[in-house]
Image (tube, helix red, strand yellow):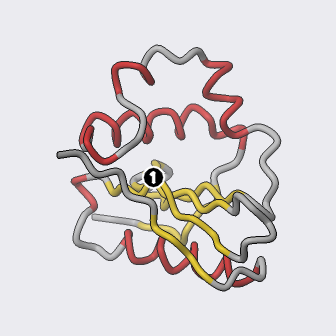
Amino acid sequence: MILLTDVHIIQPEEWLAYRDIRLAALKDAPDAFGSIYTESIRYTDAQWQDRLQDLNPATDQPMTILDDGRFVCLGWSRIEQLDSRVANLYSMWVAPTHRGHGLGRRLVNSAIDWAKGQGMEQMELDVTLYP
């Protein structure tokens, strides 16, 4: 039984769960990300913690959805240039066990709502393409 929560904003103290879902995503879909599993698995705890430290909620929104307390998907909204009026959506991934339940759509909609709330006029989905 799937007990899904609303979109959850990943907090710095959840770095371990973030690390686990990010590594799962890199392992499952190696061609879909700019980084690779074999490099990321070697990051220290401090490097994983740094990814979530000092994030500004006006420019970064790392997201997941929880199933019984576990992260089951991933997305990251970011505004890289405050004057551009464009937000980006990176790192979209849903665990194979949870695909087909609309989680990706929920992450995208949450990212769009967040970007609109920050005054953005456009959202770009950044996708890594490999031959």
Q: Is residue 57 above or below residue 5?
A: above
Question: In the rendered image, which quarter contains the N terminus?
Answer: bottom left
Relative side of 107 to 110, left or right: left
Q: Is residue 109 above or below residue 41?
A: below
Q: Is residue 102 above or below residue 81?
A: below
Report crowding for label 1: few under 14, some 14 to 19, many 20 or more residues within 10 A (C-alpha): many
Q: Amino acid at mark 1?
A: Ser
Displayed quadrant of residue 77: bottom right
Q: Residue at x 45, y 24 (%)?
A: 40
Q: Residue at x 61, y 28 (%)?
A: 48
Q: Residue at x 41, y 19 (%)?
A: 39
Of residue 96 and residue 118, the one placed in the foreground of this image is 118
Q: Seen from this angle, which residue lies furthest left? A: 131
Q: Residue at x 46, y 14 (%)?
A: 42
Relative side of 3 to 8, left or right: left
Residue 122 position within the rendered picture, expressed as x and y whole percent measured from the top left: 60, 81
Residue 127 position within the rendered picture, expressed as x and y whole percent measured from the top left: 38, 57
The secondary element bearing badge 1 is classed as strand
Relative side of 90 to 31, left or right: right
Q: Which residue is mark 1?
A: 91
Of residue 129 and residue 118, the one placed in the foreground of this image is 129
Relative side of 52 to 30, left or right: right
Residue 89 position within the rendered picture, expressed as x and y whole percent measured from the top left: 52, 63
